[in-house]
């Protein structure tokens, strides 16, 4: 009886993987990240997001970022137009809290042009996933637009790299 139970338990765990290797696609080792196209009128957002995404991939995944388009996979990102809104004003109609929203379309494909990311139920072309991040700007506290944008870029890069994990 005990032997039968042990065999059943081992058979049930046959495809189970442990460790960080189970979080990511096992057949992908290298990722090519082309320069991110930006539809925003703000300068250097695409370049800054490209740098942040490459650093996140190197730090948090087993993948190696390479400059060769024939890598195992290609992570293509397009930065959509950003939006800035006033959240709160003071008595003189001066903006006290502003919100800056960044959004991007992300597509991760292998060399054979097969999507790696699961399709999402969003009104986007096939194989694309949209991510967005917003951050608050508080000018009265001495925060600058550049520091606010950098915080949003860092969090957006974390979300994009988080999408590279395998579904459970």
Image (cartoon, rainbow, N blue to C red):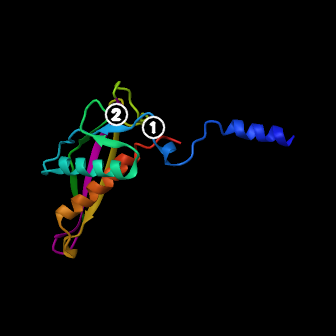
Which one is in front, 70 or 101?
70
> Which label was assigned to residue 73?
2
Sort mark 1 into few (<14), some (14-19) or many (20+) by Cα contacts within 10 Å: some
Residue 97: % across, % down: 24, 67
Tell me if 116 is positioned left or right of 50 in this view. right
Which one is in front, 36 or 60?
60
Q: Which residue is mark 1?
A: 25
Does 133 sit above or below residue 93?
Answer: above
Q: Is residue 94 visible?
A: yes
> Which label was assigned to residue 99?
none
Q: Residue at x 44, y 43 (%)?
A: 165
The span shown in magenta is 88-110
Does 45 appear in magenta?
no
Does 73 sit above or below residue 158?
Answer: above
Dot 1 or dot 2, earlier in sequence? 1
Can you tell which quarter of the image residue 110 is in? top left
- Residue at the extreme right of the image, as rendered: 1
Dominant secondary-structure state across the stretch colored magenta: strand
Quadrant of image for the N terminus? top right
- Residue at the extreme top of the image, as rendered: 112
Does 97 appear in magenta?
yes
Q: Residue at x 45, y 42 (%)?
A: 24
Sort mark 2 into few (<14), some (14-19) or many (20+) by Cα contacts within 10 Å: many
């Amino acid at each position: 009886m005990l032997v039968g139970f042990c065999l059943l338990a081992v058979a049930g765990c046959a495809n189970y993987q442990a460790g960080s290797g189970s979080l990511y696609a096992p057949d992908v080792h290298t990722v090519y990240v082309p320069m991110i196209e930006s539809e925003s009128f703000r300068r250097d957002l695409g370049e800054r997001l490209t740098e942040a995404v490459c650093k996140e991939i190197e730090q948090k995944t087993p993948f190696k970022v390479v400059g060769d388009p024939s890598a195992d996979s290609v992570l293509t990102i397009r930065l959509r137009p950003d939006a800035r809104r006033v959240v709160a004003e003071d008595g003189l109609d001066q903006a006290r809290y502003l919100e800056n929203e960044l959004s991007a379309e992300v597509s991760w494909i292998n060399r054979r042009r097969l999507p790696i990311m699961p399709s999402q139920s969003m009104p986007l072309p096939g194989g694309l996933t949209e991510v967005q991040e917003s951050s608050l700007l508080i000018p009265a506290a001495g925060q600058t637009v550049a520091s606010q944008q950098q915080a949003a870029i860092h969090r957006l890069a974390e979300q994009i790299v988080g999408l590279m994990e395998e579904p459970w």
